Amino acid sequence: MCRHLGWLGRPRTLAELMLEPPHSLLVQSYAPRRQRHGLLNADGWGAGFFDVSGGGPPRRWRSAAPLWGDASFASVAPALASGCVVAAVRSATAGMPIEASATAPFTDGTWLLSHNGVVNRAVLPTAEGAESVCDSAILAAAVFARGPETLGELIPEIGAADPGARLNVLAADGSRLLATTWGDTLSMLHGADGVVLASEPYDDDPRWVDIPDRHLVEAHGGQVRVTALDGIR
């Protein structure tokens, strides 16, 4: 159910992050290595990033088509650089619309958010401004309404209301990168130039570390903190 990636650090191009690594999001769109649910991520893709100059709302490029078929993005991605990026390729939940507005990353004008998983929409807190009727968009609206800083409290609450939910969330505001693991995979590569959080490693660098299930990752100011989410058993 989707693969996503977040970067926080020195400016890197979208091509460096999404297209060029040997197991990039591009490859994960048709041949993911660690995906537990679904075989392909062909129901759209999205990239969100913040201007390198700082300030202003995040920029987004989203499509309902497979990433492997977007020659326009492939030609422009080497020229788009940012120090904070959230990107995803999508495998739509059964019954959910396949449209650009249902594709991560979602935004409230300040934060970018991607959801890898599935959740019963009926258990989500009521929130206005969802970009689509899909579960991920409604979850994003609920997170924005509560504040992404409260992910450590909100995700366990939603998980308790829907025991079958998978709630891997990735959020960024230009200077912070947050992520949760709840029912799916997440790996981290933390180097001198920044940190990558990804559903699965995009290369075979031995420095990748797998984040345990039901944990919160917070990256800010060159530091990374990983803590257990409330309710872990």
Image: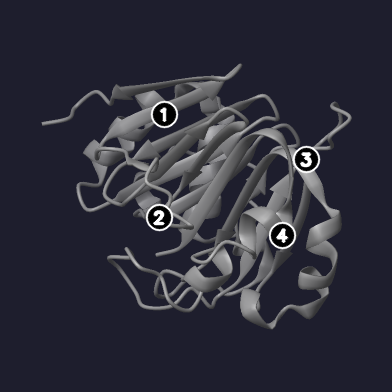
Look at the picture and state if 230 lies above or below 87. Answer: above
Please report whichever mark, 1 or 3, sits nearer to the chain's N-terminal start: 3
Label 4: element kind = helix
SS type, badge 3 = loop
Q: Which residue is mark 3?
A: 58
Mark 2 to mark 3: distance in Å? Answer: 24 Å
The kind of residue on which mark 3 rests is: Pro
* Earlier residue among tags 2 and 1: 2
Q: Are marks 2 and 3 in contact (CB under 8 Å)?
A: no
Question: Spatial distance from mark 4 to mark 3, Cα to Cα?
Answer: 18 Å
Q: How far is the residue under mark 1 from the one under mark 4?
A: 25 Å
Of labels 4 and 3, earlier in sequence is 4
Q: Which residue is located at x 80 percent, y 46 percent? A: 81
Q: CA distance from mark 2 to mark 1?
A: 15 Å
Q: Which residue is mark 2?
A: 200
Say few, some or many: other residues with alpha carbon within 10 Å of mark 4 (under 14 / 14 to 19 / 20 or more): many
Name the disc covering residue 15, or none.
4
Residue depicted at x 47% and y 60%: 3
Horizontal relation, residue 34 to residue 71: left or right: left
Q: Earlier in the sequence, mark 2 or mark 4?
A: 4
Mark in the foreground, 1 or 3: 1
The residue most toward the bottom is 69
Q: Alpha-carbon neighbours of circle 1 within 10 Å: few (<14), some, or many (≥20)?
A: many
